[in-house]
Amino acid sequence: MIPRVPRDLRPLFEPRSVAVVGASNNPAKWGQWFARGAVSGEHRRSVYLVNRGGGEVLGRPTFRSLGDLPEAPELVVLAVPAAAFEESVDASLAAGARAVVAIAAGLGESGEEGLRRERSVVDRVRRAGAVLLGPNCMGVYDGAAGLDLASSDFEPGPIGLVSQSGNLALEVSLLAADVGLGISRFASLGNQADLEAGELVTSLIDHEPTRVIALYCEDFRDGRAFARAALEAVEAGKPVILLTVGAGEVGAQAARSHTGALVSNETAVEAACRAAGMVRVRSPRELIDLAQAELARVRPRGRRVVIVGDGGGHGIVASDVASAEGLDLPPLSDELQGRIAPHLPDAAPTRNPVDFAGAGEQFLTIFEDVTRIILESGEVDAALVTGYFGGYSEFSDEFQAEETEVALGMARAAKDTERALVVQSMYPRSPSLVALREAGVPVYREIEAAAWALARLADQAERSPRGVPELPPPAEGPVPTGYWEARELVASAGIELSPARRVTKADEARAAAAELGYPVAVKALGLLHKSDAGGVALGIANEGALGDALANMATLSPEGYSVERMAPVGDGVELIAGCIRDPRFGPIVLVGIGGIYAELLKDTAVALAPVDAPQAEELVRSLRGAAILEGARGRPPVDVPAAAEAVAALSQLAASRPDLAEIEINPLLVTSSGALVLDARVLSGENGADAR
Amino acid sequence: MIPRVPRDLRPLFEPRSVAVVGASNNPAKWGQWFARGAVSGEHRRSVYLVNRGGGEVLGRPTFRSLGDLPEAPELVVLAVPAAAFEESVDASLAAGARAVVAIAAGLGESGEEGLRRERSVVDRVRRAGAVLLGPNCMGVYDGAAGLDLASSDFEPGPIGLVSQSGNLALEVSLLAADVGLGISRFASLGNQADLEAGELVTSLIDHEPTRVIALYCEDFRDGRAFARAALEAVEAGKPVILLTVGAGEVGAQAARSHTGALVSNETAVEAACRAAGMVRVRSPRELIDLAQAELARVRPRGRRVVIVGDGGGHGIVASDVASAEGLDLPPLSDELQGRIAPHLPDAAPTRNPVDFAGAGEQFLTIFEDVTRIILESGEVDAALVTGYFGGYSEFSDEFQAEETEVALGMARAAKDTERALVVQSMYPRSPSLVALREAGVPVYREIEAAAWALARLADQAERSPRGVPELPPPAEGPVPTGYWEARELVASAGIELSPARRVTKADEARAAAAELGYPVAVKALGLLHKSDAGGVALGIANEGALGDALANMATLSPEGYSVERMAPVGDGVELIAGCIRDPRFGPIVLVGIGGIYAELLKDTAVALAPVDAPQAEELVRSLRGAAILEGARGRPPVDVPAAAEAVAALSQLAASRPDLAEIEINPLLVTSSGALVLDARVLSGENGADAR
């Protein structure tokens, strides 16, 4: 659990004094790397090198212990093995340290004993009012503070980087440097024994040099606290980019239900991203492509894009790629085309894409003029310039000067019109484009990167963060032991189920069916997997068929039967709705298109639970298949608000019952007149008991 | 139409003499660029500069006309405006030219008059036994022949490049240079008045320096001839990579039917790629990423991949990305893990991904040792090494030497075991990795590029080209004028339709329904859009309902009615099958999952038509939803061979009827006992008449 009141991490990132314990002259040892890094900041702060054996390190005198220092070190870096972990942390606290960075591996990540040792140390760190980064971490860096205590070399820049992998952080920084970006702060997460990702994100919100926050994280610990921290950063205008991986415990656990088959390992992360307004990326390259976009001086307010190419096939290729990324390429109005045509050669396409047809090399200024005219029109949210621009600088110094001026003119056009501009060029390192980047315009070498990043900005323009819901107080109640009890639990939340009667004998079943009206369904009770075992019979049309069905099921020796009125399945759309409890992010609600094609369609939407009815309706309407709910093949529209009410109630129920691992209503039949649950199941948390 | 006997293009790519007409001293003119290029090959061949005004160009004497040359120029480059097109081509032919390159724009691409002029010239070129590249083209290049007559600078290498865009060719060459690749031959397609893409591809098959063929093409002309040429190249061991765009006439035309809604502009290209074994890419970057992979010394024989990371999160990120690309990451056997574990630190993961956990920096040789052990095991088809490798060279010259040796050892391991190796590194320009590339191992900077390219090689390993089917002789027959005639056409191909009776009066309808048996469907005949207008009534249960339905439809004043036996829709799977005639690639057959979710699923497969029944069955079984055909929710498997017979018959019918633009059977209901067409429609070609 992250402490609710954010702690002051200044001693970690901007310490007034630093001590390196384990400082060494051996160039193959961490102790030398960190000593070297600390010494590079000698002009900014006091630096103390501690070496048990004494003597000099890097030409500086060392101290034999932290107790010998002339002042309390604000930050202590521990380049010592795991065996010395407790001892050296305690010594740091005794010496008055406010922040400790522990490099040692072999603690919490290696098993229970290590975890226990970490927890005990963290208690003492927190009682002392200090913070601990690591253990098993690669250090810390702060560009503006000149603090370089990380295993990699970073250049200063606008990206606040929090990473659970040193090598990935290094790759991110190398890719960043390629596009003129650097790192404002870096914290290596390590085992997150004390400081977790969320608290580090929080510390970047008020850090002025940090303009975008990037994380590589495998283990989210308190996922909701992390999501809240990210949401706060996003709302403060600092976009959060998350690189994470599919590992986790959810998948295996959830595969016991249909919801489980639709929930991937990544579902909870997806829900957290939508809640907090984070963007998930899948690689270091995407992280940097997006960071560049997030730093654009002008962001698009929607997804309407004009493609401007300077000739050849670039405009057409860009149009294809941009459309595939989900950007809209509206045809420019005749009026607007009429205004740009005089700038272009006779046959040049002006509809969208706009193609200069090679005229750029004669009149470079048309890049600025045409881009400005289009952006001023308001017909698009962004211009994507693609192809050769940047290459004119190759011709001569005069061309370079002119191209740079034109580039800055394009940037001004974007700023003046408050419409976004993104450039793809085969010469991305051209001085004109370096100038353009510095003016706040993202420049990409590959068209797919440019279009992808622009589409992510458009996504963000269209949907604001959903927010991180508070959990209701835990409720008590019996854990359903079977299908009938699962129905009762669902019904207790105010969700309507198909009318049913619980019976034990054939004559009771006949009476129930007569009362409900044929056709009916019969389900055997008390079986672990009622449908697999032949314990479900649907569409029973009359008393004779009912007798046959009961006779067949009797061989299963059920505890009893549920006789249910058959719903008009053909008249509606089958949805699936479920809640799972993720060990990191808590309850997650899922809705999806159900029925025979459910697992093929994989058309689902997820959110952190609980959701209210309007949020649930937004979820349902966000399905790709939402059009089918509006009426397909001449059917009337179905009652989406009723479905949303059921989903919201289910999510409230699940959020209040931490003892239940999964609750699923499937199918949730939605017709023009309402929403009706036709089957339900509940999995309890600890023992995995399965009530269906 | 490409001449059926391939012509000799040696005079175009390896001429013994070259003349440049329009050679100029003005550095802003094409005439100078081409003169400069020609002169750069003076040591290889005779070069003649022709300038109407005489005098010197680039310090060389010029000739006033081609007639003045001392010998027949094998190749003539025409840097003259469109007005001089005919005159200068004729002069070239008169002077004995075997190949002509025409740069001039403003001919065939600008309208009918230009097309007419081109056709007339091409007739004369062909009669003279010469070839013409262009007009509206950017020239020609041959690395081995030292022929540099293109608007861009190329470096020699293994990629044969044919492009309809000069700027995209330039971008491809810049990206190629980044990974040590160059261009063997380049031909700018221009308007393809004479030489088309297909014939140029054919010319590269026997061109030894060309090891992979890359095309950017917007306009395929004779698409089947192009596909045949590509197939021949692929079968000769020269992979063909196609960059193309979605433009084309198919989309607008096809949108008149459901097949049309499922057929994108790119469907015909997709069918051609599968027929010829070409790989479609969407950007220059993908083109070069794939070219590198196609040039790998060892190709994978399947999609089983081991990920080898040297620490940090690289192994996990790579696993996620590779899985998302459809690669398989089998867990290594316990036995194999037992053999690699001794090389790695204690807690290092060995299952897959294999993570060296930082041990690489202590023992670089484990990269070679572990990779070799895994590849030798035969448990995977390829190893994907990801992360830091390449960066060890940064430490010192000794590290660089050792890393290079280890890299070459990994390449040898791949060669010895005939298992593929691909490397992703954050230091792709490291000398060790340059050496690795030269040893035939693809090296990528981005993990998504490495995984994507490897997945494309796996695709190729798993599916051989389908072949380009010959078209049957055109058949004659009436063009269906309505739904009933469409049914009759489909039935004439031996395809079973739901039993139906054509009636005009209510009493005939009652008699037909009684004969067929209720429930029945009734469709009004003679309407343009029978279903939109309320001209279809399904599930009519009895005579009363039939009377109501007929009364309703009578207001539409139909020509008559089709009374049809209702099929057991709930017991089967609805497929959609259709054939469209693409103006470039001819008849294309499509199958897909039908029903309410068809356009949402977009689960379709396409092929050049005609297909035989086994090919049709392969198409059906390639659908993502194929598992549903095998029986879902406890249903029996459906009769896929019967569906395939219907699809094959439909494709044969469509291929033999060039006068029909579209034939569609939808739904094609497939049950456990057969396949039955429930509705059919035919669109004729020229007038777009719609028979449904």
Image (cartoon, coloured by chain):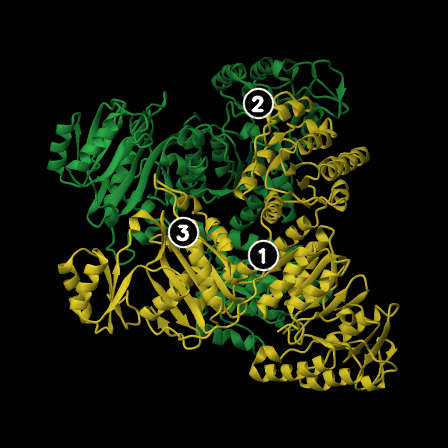
Chain colours: A yellow, B green
Quadrant placement of the N terminus of chain A: bottom right
Quadrant for residue B439, please give it.
bottom right
Using the rendered image, report if marks 1 and 2 lie on a common chain. no
Apparent side of residue B472 relative to residue A450 in the rendered image (left or right): left
Chain of the residue under label 1: A
Apparent side of residue A68 relative to residue B410 in the rendered image (left or right): right
B447, above or below A302, in the image: below
Q: Measured from the top left, where is residue A362 in percent x and y?
A: 73, 26
Give the amino acid type for the residue marked by disc 2 in the picture.
Pro
Q: Is residue B388 visible?
A: no
Do the residues under discs 1 and 2 have CB atoms within 8 angstroms? no
Give the amino acid type for the residue marked by disc 1 in the picture.
Arg
A636, above or below B377, in the image: above
Residues at marks 3 and 2, CA–CA distance in whole angstroms: 48 Å
Q: Measured from the top left, where is residue B174 in percent x and y?
A: 65, 42
Apparent side of residue A257 relative to residue B505 in the rendered image (left or right): right
Residue assigned mark 2: B135
Mark carried by residue B188: none
Q: Nearer the viewer, residue B494 or A692?
A: A692
Residues at marks 3 and 1, CA–CA distance in whole angstroms: 22 Å
Q: Measured from the top left, where is residue A184 in percent x and y?
A: 75, 60
Do the residues under discs 3 and 2 have CB atoms within 8 angstroms? no
Q: Nearer the viewer, residue A531 or A285?
A: A531
Mark carried by residue A280: 1
Closer to the observer: label 1 or label 2?
Answer: 1
Crowd around label 3: few <14 · some 14–19 · many ≥20 (10 Å): many
Quadrant for residue A413, please give it.
top right
Apparent side of residue A593 relative to residue B559 in the rendered image (left or right): right
Residue assigned mark 3: A601
Mark 3: secondary structure: helix
Closer to the observer: label 3 or label 2?
Answer: 3
